[in-house]
Image: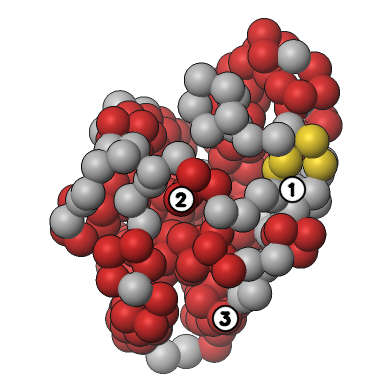
Amino acid sequence: MRYSVLAHGKRLRPQLVLAGGIYVGRRLEEFREPALAVEYLHTYSLIHDDLPAMDNDDWRRGKPTSHRVFGDAMAILAGDALLTEAFTKMADIRLCEQFPAHQVVRAAGVLGQAAGRQGLIEGQVKDLASEGQTLELAALSDLHRKKTGALIVACLRIPAILVGDREAEARLSDFGHHLGLAFQIVDDILNEIGDARKMGKATGTDRLLGKATYPGILGMSQARELALQHRAMAHEALGDGYEASILRELIDFTVDRQW
């Protein structure tokens, strides 16, 4: 568990939880447990995604993947343990002392839905089923709204749910929708042209596995333009104000990153 969680990574999802907390006017330390929860959950998904039965990847975050170091069975168990630990963090007594219990329960439910059969798992199922097939753009976007976007949206909704701010939750959800798609488009582009040493994982794997990608459907130039459009819509969703500055910086980094 420690091997994968403590490996180098962007930590985008926990940063989104913390930045969402600033957006709703609270202190970073109030959202420590949810931030850890989403990082544990995301890391579990990477461990399982890398397994031979899934994408069969050898490198993740600049290190050999968990199953390459510890074997398939131990990697599965490490992922299972991190998924379970994520919800232990969401039920932490400190969180229940800071926020109303019914809001903590709702936040945990949103995280579970994003990670489950209507979110990440459904997206992964569709991703595996679509290998070697040609997808329309709408079908590809739906796949990634679940596989990548659902957890990103949940990260942003959780702080607003905990403080009971429905208006902020709607704005953050809209922002997260566009961020998730922009993130995936850029990921697809970097899988084709990125530097594997900087990215910490193999490139060209989408093509080898016959996966549908945004550059594959649209071409590089149009895929990049679509990412820019989603960035613009994400900025618009947030509105003006200093409290949104970190979120604006995060989506700018997501779209402009070269690794």
Residue that numbered label 1 is attached to:
61
Q: Which residue is drawn at 34% across and 62% down?
A: 216
- Residue type for callout 3: Asp
- Residue type for callout 2: Arg
Residue that numbered label 2 is attached to:
207
Q: How is the image coloured?
A: secondary structure
> Gap in Å between the C-alphas at discs 3 and 1?
19 Å
The answer to whether any part of residue 151 appears in the image is: yes
Q: Answer few, some or many: residues within 10 Å of disc 1's Cα (few below 14, many 20 plus, some between 14 and 19).
A: many
Residue that numbered label 3 is attached to:
256
> Gap in Å between the C-alphas at discs 2 and 1?
20 Å
When the figure is inspected, residue 174 is found, relative to residue 161, above or below; the finding is: below
Q: Which of 155 and 54 is in front in this view?
A: 54
What secondary structure is marked by label 1?
loop
The answer to whether any part of residue 238 appears in the image is: no
Query: Along the polypeptide, which appears first: circle 2 or circle 1?
Result: 1
